[in-house]
């Protein structure tokens, strides 16, 4: 993880970074347990989810529908590595992560396969003081399958 630059706001930045790490850990747990309700507690009211190979899901209802589809289709067992958390202002920050693990296609006889992604989260501190995911995009880091 890259260090934040030292400044008078460093304690607030450290607090924000710790809170964001905690939210990303909660997100990892929610994904691995396929818990749509837990995922949604981590998203902002104006959330946008931008999964690879799909159009963006804009707004809470669309994000909820997208995660239901994900969890109805696959079972994830992944772990996040947080490479960078950068406060952009008092109430905005981004986090850059990587994840690795396995994905199992539900209803298939295929064994679980390797899953690896890079992710970018834009987080917003809402009026209740909680950092929530405002925008989230990811792409695979696995090489393309050869014909």
Image (spheres, grey):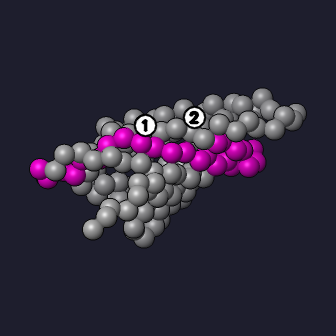
User: Which quadrant is home to the N terminus?
Assistant: top right
Q: Secondary structure at mark 2?
A: helix
Q: Are marks 1 and 2 in contact (CB under 8 Å)?
A: no
Residue 92's spot in the image, x, y percent? 68, 49
User: Which quadrant is home to the C terminus?
Assistant: bottom left
Residue 137's spot in the image, x, y percent? 50, 58
Whether 138 is drawn above or below 82: the answer is below
The span shown in magenta is 84-109
Q: Give whichever of discs 1 and 2 has the lower sequence position.
A: 2
- Residue 81 visible: yes
Mark 1–mark 2 distance (CA, rounded to whole Å): 13 Å
> Dot 1 surroundings within 10 Å: few (below 14), some, or many (20 or more)?
some
- Nearer to us of marks 1 and 2 is 1
Whether 135 is drawn above or below 111: the answer is below
Whether residue 94 appears in magenta in the rendering, the answer is yes
Q: What residue is rendered at 32% in x and 62% in y? A: 145
Q: Is residue 147 left or right of residue 82?
A: left
Residue 80's spot in the image, x, y percent? 48, 39
Q: What residue is rendered at 31% in x and 64% in y? A: 146
Whether residue 104 appears in magenta in the rendering, the answer is yes
Q: Secondary structure at mark 1?
A: strand
> What residue is shown with label 2?
21
The circle drawn on residue 94 is none
Kindly indicate the quadrant of the structure image that contains residue 126: top right
Residue 82's spot in the image, x, y percent? 57, 39
> What residue is shown with label 1?
79
Residue, far bottom: 55
């Amino acid at each position: 993880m890259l260090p934040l630059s030292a400044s008078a706001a460093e304690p607030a930045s450290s607090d924000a970074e710790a809170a964001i790490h905690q939210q990303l850990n909660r997100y990892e747990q929610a994904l691995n347990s396929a818990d749509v309700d837990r995922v949604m507690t981590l998203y902002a009211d104006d959330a946008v989810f931008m999964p690879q190979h799909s159009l963006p899901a804009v707004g809470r209802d669309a994000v909820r529908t997208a995660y239901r589809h994900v969890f109805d289709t696959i079972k994830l067992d992944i772990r996040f590595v947080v490479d960078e958390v950068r406060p952009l202002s008092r109430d905005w920050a981004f986090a850059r992560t990587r994840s690795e693990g396995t994905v199992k296609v539900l209803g298939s006889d295929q064994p679980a396969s390797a899953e690896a992604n890079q992710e970018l989260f834009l987080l917003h501190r809402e009026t209740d003081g909680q950092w929530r995911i405002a925008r989230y995009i990811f792409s695979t880091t696995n090489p393309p399958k050869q014909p």
